[in-house]
Image: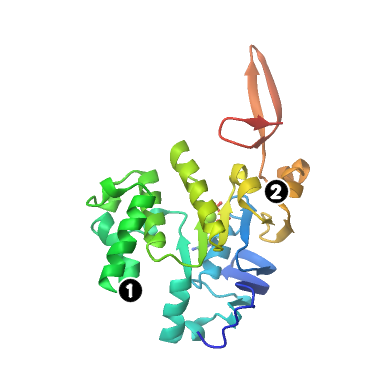
Amino acid sequence: MKKQNSDSPVFELEKVSYYYRNQQALEDISLKISKGERLIILGANGSGKSTLLKMLDGLYFPSKGSIKAFGVKIDADFFQNEENFYDFRKKVGFVFQDPDVQLFSPTVWDEVIFAPLHLGFSNSEVLRRAKTALKLLDIEHLKNRPPYLLSGGEKKRVALATVLAFNPEVWLFDEPTASLDPRSQSRFLDFLDTLSDRGNTVVIATHDLSIVEDMADRVLVLSEEHKMVRLGKPMNILEDIPFLSKHNLVHDHRHKHKKETHKHLHIHVTDHEHKD
Ligand SMILES: Nc1ncnc2c1ncn2[C@@H]1O[C@H](COP(=O)(O)OP(=O)(O)OP(=O)(O)O)[C@@H](O)[C@H]1O
Ligand SMILES: [Mg+2]
């Protein structure tokens, strides 16, 4: 990649807006993400989280404003250059919200070797990486199965393995904990810790508040009007219940006690615990 500067932020967004034809998805986002940072993007359905991740992955380009990755502007011209394209794809991995859009090979094994093979690793390295990825995600037993016949959570783990197999320095996760059972969730959180210990940059879009405190250095909150309404420390945001409620990140929870219905705000801290 040309003019790359190791001191540059991993991503630098300047006044970025995005529209799908006339449908607004992001409005005026300015943000820097540093190397090794763990950033969580919070926002209600439709606020623009997935769109923002896709822009960081160079799948969409800003309708207004600009994005730099590793100090270089990423736009259509940038990706026209083959060297830039492969260099960027090796460095940045994306685990999609919906694994069905990510998985297309006849077997899980084919799926996991696909990226390292196409990114130019040697055959022995491809084998080593694919085996390690299957082992780490505990899906060796699914190796010969067609991905489209797996359960939602199994597909999610295969999708993670496909990225792990090329081991990028930047990881973009869209709703990673959705559809994972408690053991897989816990393993996934351990996996995030490992990435973080290794100095990887991690950006996660979610509305799962239970992962925010442990997994984020900073939190960005998008409003339902697609604007950045907060960028700050996890605890300052988690403790601001009126703010979370306003942006549809906590809900009014109804309980029935005998014949009475109680209604009060809830923040989900873990799967089993509620903090009022
Ligand atoms: N392909 C598309 N064409 C038109 N509009 C789209 C498209 N994809 C998303 N949108 C719209 O853009 C806005 C942002 O969508 P996005 O998928 O980024 O939200 P999100 O925060 O990821 O939501 P969710 O929590 O449901 O995953 C929404 O209003 C959505 O309807
Ligand atoms: Mg989304």
Which residue is at 36% across, 56% downward? Answer: 133
Name the residue carrying label 2: 247
Mark 1 and mark 2: Cα distance apart in space: 44 Å
- The answer to which quarter of the image holds residue 125 is bottom left
Neighbor class of circle 1 (other Cα within 10 Å; few <14, some 14-19, many 20+) is some
> Residue 257 at x, y = what percent?
65, 15
Neighbor class of circle 2 (other Cα within 10 Å; few <14, some 14-19, many 20+) is many
The answer to whether residue 185 is left or right of residue 64 is left
Which residue is at 63% across, 58% downward? Answer: 39
Secondary structure under the numbered disc 2 in the rendered image: loop
Residue type at the position of mark 1 = Phe
Residue 104 shows in the view = no
> Residue 60 at x, y = what percent?
52, 72
Name the residue carrying label 1: 121
- The answer to which quarter of the image holds residue 240 is top right
65 vs 159: above or below: below
Name the disc covering residue 174, or none. Answer: none
Mark 1 and mark 2 lie on one chain; the one further toward the N terminus is 1
Give the camera-side residue of 247 and 162.
Answer: 162
Ligand number 1: quarter of image: bottom right
Residue type at the position of mark 2 = His
